[in-house]
Image (cartoon, helix red, strand yellow):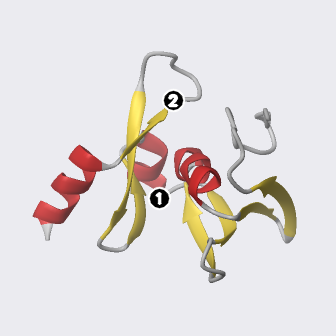
Amino acid sequence: MKEKKIWGELLGASVPSMSQPNKTYKVFLGEHGWECTCPDFQFRHGSHKYRVVFNDGHEEVIQGCKHIGFYLAEIAKEVCVVVEGAELRLAGKAKVKNITFGLFKITP
């Protein structure tokens, strides 16, 4: 199944780094769910939880990095960042520059 990961990294969605202007990471649906090539995902499997309502109406809670959250906000109907039992709603199909919470900023 390593081939699927390689294809995902090659054909995945390019998402800009939030801290390095000329760097991008690949977000893709891998063998075990959403994956990203960024260090946060590679070492910690992401430090954020998102409640996502997709356009077909199904809902999932997804653990991931901010790049996965950024991509989900582009393709889903609604995305909420789950933080210690609370939720911060992000508009679906939002043109979002940064999707993070806490020490970071959310920029519409």
Q: Residue furthest top?
A: 22
At x 54% / y 49%, what residue is drawn?
Answer: 71
Badge 2: residue crowd in 10 Å (few <14, some 14–19, many ≥20): some
Front residue of 100/70: it is 70
- Which residue in the protein does label 2 denote? 17
The image quadrant that residue 38 belongs to is top left
**Disc on res. 95:** none
Secondary structure under tag 1 reads loop
Residue 87 appears at what percent x and percent y? 85, 64
Image x and y of residue 31, in percent: 29, 72
Residue at point 57%, 23% (across, down): 19
On screen, 91 above or below 17? below
Who's the residue at 53% across and 52% down the image?
A: 68
Instruction: Decide which of tag 2 and tag 1 comes sooner along the chain.
Output: 2
Q: Residue furthest bottom?
A: 58
Contact, mark 2 vs mark 1 (Cβ under 8 Å):
no
Label placed on residue 45: 1
Amino acid carrying mark 1 in the image? His
> Tag 2, which secondary structure?
loop
Q: Residues within 10 Å of mark 1 (few under 14, many from 20)?
A: some
The picture places residue 74, in percent across and down from the top left corner, at: 60, 50
Residue depicted at 76% across the width and 62% down the height: 80
Q: Give above or below for 2 relative to 40.
A: below
Viewer-nearest of discs 2 and 1: 2
